[in-house]
Amino acid sequence: MKNTHIRTKALAIIFIVLVGYFLWKIIDAKKIDTNTQLTKSIPKKNLNHYQSKLLKFSVLLPDNFQINEKQTGVIFDLNNNSIVIARSATEFNNIEDHVKKLMRINKTALSNERKIEINHIEAISGIIKYDKNNSEKIIYLYLDGWIYDISTSSPELFDDLDAIAQTFQFTP
């Protein structure tokens, strides 16, 4: 009787330790890089605040960009190059599943993929290579069933894209 009681306690302790270990591994695997410093920041003195009431977001961007708002996105132009912020709905409740399906449907891959957080918004950044000479830097942000993607195919705007993305705010 005493051996059975000791054996039961030992098994309970082993079970608790194993469950704790697996929970720790699951949580550790899903950690988000909260360092939103993707690259260098924009100097604060040269920034303009832009808010899209239609698409419900705001950003800070260098004052030399021209702005063209459309129904599903905003185009920020600079010297015949552009950064686009677009919004679309998603059937998924997380960013990972949305991006995986998008890559599968478009038969593309996201290289240099990083899961990040921008102003408390879940995000994934990376590069899509279309061929040897064409690629696009993109940041997907997920918020309550909406996907905002911030992208450019102009390598000279990659740093600007990162800096603008760091200032992204949802404005309900």
Image: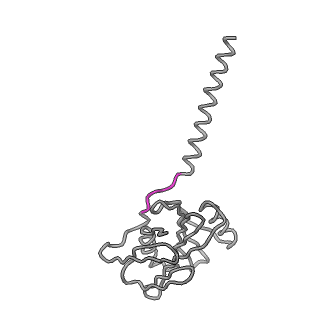
The secondary structure that most of the magenta stretch takes on is loop
Q: How many marks?
A: 0
Q: 76 above or below 88?
A: below
* Residue 7 vs residue 135, the one in the foreground: 7
Residue 165 lies in the magenta stretch? no
Give the quadrant of residue 87: bottom right
Q: State the scheme by which the image is colored.
A: one colour
Image location of residue 64, percent across then percent down? 37, 84
Give the quadrant of residue 21: top right
Q: Residue furthest top?
A: 1
Give the quadrant of residue 2: top right
* Residue 98 vs residue 171, the one in the foreground: 171
Q: 87 above or below 100?
A: below
* Residue 45 vs residue 33, the one in the foreground: 45
* Residue 84 vs residue 50, the one in the foreground: 50
Residue 35 lies in the magenta stretch? yes
Image location of residue 7, percent across then percent down? 66, 19
Image location of residue 26, percent across then percent down? 59, 46
Residue shown at 54% from the left, 84% from the top: 70
